[in-house]
Amino acid sequence: GETVFGCNVVMTEPTICDLLGHAGCDFVWIDMEHGAIDYKDALYHVIAAHASGAAAIIRVPGNDPDMMKKVLDMGVDGIIYPMVRSAKEARNIIESCLYPPYGFRGFNPLGAANYGAIDQATYCANSQQTTLRIVMVEHIDAYRELDEILAIPGLDGIMIGPSDLSGSMNRLLQRDDPEVTQIIEDVVVRSRAAGKFVGTALGCTIPAEKFTSWMEKGIQMLSVGQELDFLYNAVSSKIKEIKQAAGE
């Protein structure tokens, strides 16, 4: 029930996740959808995040059950499923992450069971509680079937994607458009009423007041930006500062 903060990661270097954990992130959002991160990179990111005490949450590049199985077996703390369009699709996604009789996930948990340190029976008994299953509402089609999505057994939370949601409404990047904002607020209210947590990602240049505003509305999982943006902004700002001091 607490609010948690994290950072998106698109670079392949796993040291970043170790750094972010030490910087105070409760979780790292490892982005296989948009970054150049492959399975091996993702595994190293998971190990690095755990080394610094941060939860490792992977956004998979698509909603293929075979791909999700490999990610789950790494021992991730959660999976974010992008661009879900319907309750039917969401149900198939959730069931692909659960062992029978609740779903159809294949068995060989590897890192998820600490490579055998956790016995198979104990792992199976606890697997549903150790990995978060998060569906993204970032398309107007998903919003139209929100109640059906929220009713799916095994769904833990909703991640709102304001940019793509606005795009699906032909208002790309108009995240503060009144209709877009109203839909986002409605997603938060209905999701929380259904017992699901809600998250979103905001940019690193967004003022703190914007974050606290969404926290007051009920969002509990917040990414404060993308590591590339933090790096670019810090370096470019420092170079400008030095040049100005030097009169250039």
Image (spheres, rainbow, N blue to C red):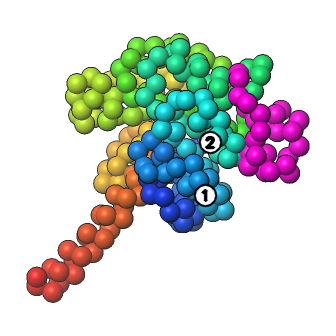
Q: Secondary structure at mark 2?
A: helix
Residue at the location (35% across, 54% down)? 204
Q: Tell me if residue 53 comes above or below residue 100 in the rendering.
A: below
Q: Which residue is mark 1?
A: 44
| Image quarter of the N terminus | top right
Image x and y of residue 225, in percent: 40, 51
* Magenta region includes residue 113: yes
Q: CA distance from mark 2 to mark 1?
A: 12 Å
Return the x and y of residue 156 as percentages of the image width and height: 61, 29
Q: Label 2 belongs to which residue?
A: 71
Question: Residue 116 lies in magenta, yes or no?
Answer: yes
Residue 114 vs residue 236, the one in the foreground:
114
- The magenta-colored residue range is 103-128
Q: Magenta-highlighted stretch: main secondary structure?
A: helix
Helix, strand or loop at disc 1?
Answer: helix
x 31%, y 35%: residue: 163
Whether residue 105 is visible to the viewer of this picture, yes or no, is yes
How many C-alpha atoms fall within 10 Å of the one at disc 2: few (<14), some, or many (≥20)? many
34 in relation to 218, above or below: below
Identified at 10% across, 84% down, the residue is 247
Q: Amino acid at mark 2?
A: Val
Q: Would residue 219 be found to the left or right of residue 104 on screen?
A: left
* Dot label at residue 87: none
Point out the residue furthest to the bottom here: 246
Quadrant of the image occupied by residue 112:
top right
Left or right of 140 in this view: 223: right
